[in-house]
């Protein structure tokens, strides 16, 4: 149990366009979902935390108007990178946790390349 | 906010030897400390975790120790094997919430 999927696994888009990444908990209800960004040879940096039905809480330095997060149900959260630029190219990973649980279950990640 | 420091950044060991990675954290309210293994291009995999009410936890060749007073925790891998080669991350959380990750340790196990 506790499987998290992400779609797409990789995406290439042109500069200035928007791209949406989906994160799904397949066999449990995810009260909270987290979005991370990981640049090559670096650590995971938390971008935002989202709870179902609430607005996401963004980390300092993350532009909420550029990285739109929607957590419409207990099994789905989406991250939309708007007006993407080459510097947004990165590995985006989501995670999900059950209600009042410590452990986070990670998705397989989405490799975004902006040309 | 929480700050997690991790050392060393790279660690080369001979197969069969032990590997130790150390992390320190700043927020005394942190009470959950997981360790992840990440292979290139893959998701982080939880390998072991510890909560603040426990000083040590072991699972086969992997163990974690926690010193709350000093605010540091360590990962110990014994009898290392080539398949242990990966990047290892420590993290800290104040519970039911966001994880702050360390910078990572590239472990290379040479046969």
Image (cartoon, rainbow, N blue to C red):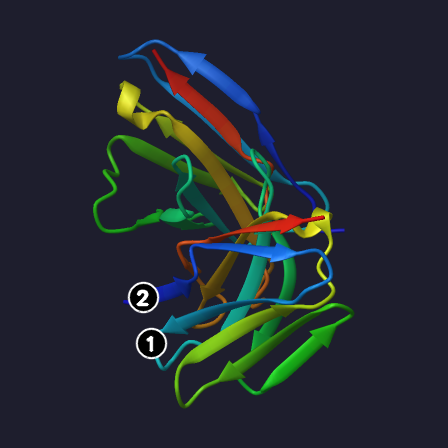
x, y percent for residue B57: 67, 79
x, y percent for residue B63: 66, 73
The image quarter in which residue B48 lies: bottom right
Question: Height in image: A75 above or below B23?
Answer: above
Q: In the image shown, does A65 or A90 lie closer to the viewer?
A: A90
Is residue A15 in view? yes
Q: Chain of mark 1?
A: B
Q: Chain of mark 2?
A: B
**Element on which disc 2 rests:** loop
Q: Are marks 1 and 2 in contact (CB under 8 Å)?
A: yes
Question: Height in image: B43 above or below B68?
Answer: above
- The tag earlier along the polypeptide, 1 or 2, is 2
**Element on which disc 1 rests:** loop
- Disc 1: which residue: B27
| Residue at image coords 68%, 64% | B17
Query: Is B24 positioned to the left or the right of A86 in the image?
Result: right
- Disc 2: which residue: B3
Query: Is B57 positioned to the left or the right of B74 in the image?
Result: right
């Amino acid at each position: 149990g506790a499987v998290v999927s992400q779609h797409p696994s990789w995406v290439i888009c042109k500069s200035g366009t928007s791209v949406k990444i989906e994160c799904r908990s397949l066999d449990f209800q995810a009260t909270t979902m987290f979005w991370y960004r990981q640049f090559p040879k670096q650590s995971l940096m938390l971008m935002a935390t989202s709870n179902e039905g609430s607005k996401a809480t963004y980390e300092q330095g993350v532009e909420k108007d550029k990285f739109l997060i929607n957590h419409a149900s207990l099994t789905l959260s989406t991250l939309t990178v708007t007006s993407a630029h080459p510097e947004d190219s990165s590995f985006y990973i989501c995670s999900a946790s059950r209600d009042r649980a410590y452990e986070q279950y990670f998705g397989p990640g989405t490799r975004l390349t902006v040309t | 906010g929480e700050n997690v420091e991790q050392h060393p950044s790279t660690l080369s060991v001979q197969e069969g030897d032990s590997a130790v990675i150390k992390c320190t954290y700043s927020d005394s309210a942190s009470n959950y400390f997981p360790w992840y293994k990440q292979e290139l291009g893959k998701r982080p995999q939880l390998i072991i975790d510890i909560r603040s009410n426990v000083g040590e936890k072991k699972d086969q060749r992997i163990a974690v120790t926690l010193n709350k007073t000093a605010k540091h925790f360590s990962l110990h891998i014994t009898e290392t094997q080539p398949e242990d080669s990966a990047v290892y991350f420590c993290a800290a959380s104040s519970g039911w919430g966001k994880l702050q990750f360390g910078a990572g340790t590239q472990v290379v196990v040479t046969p």
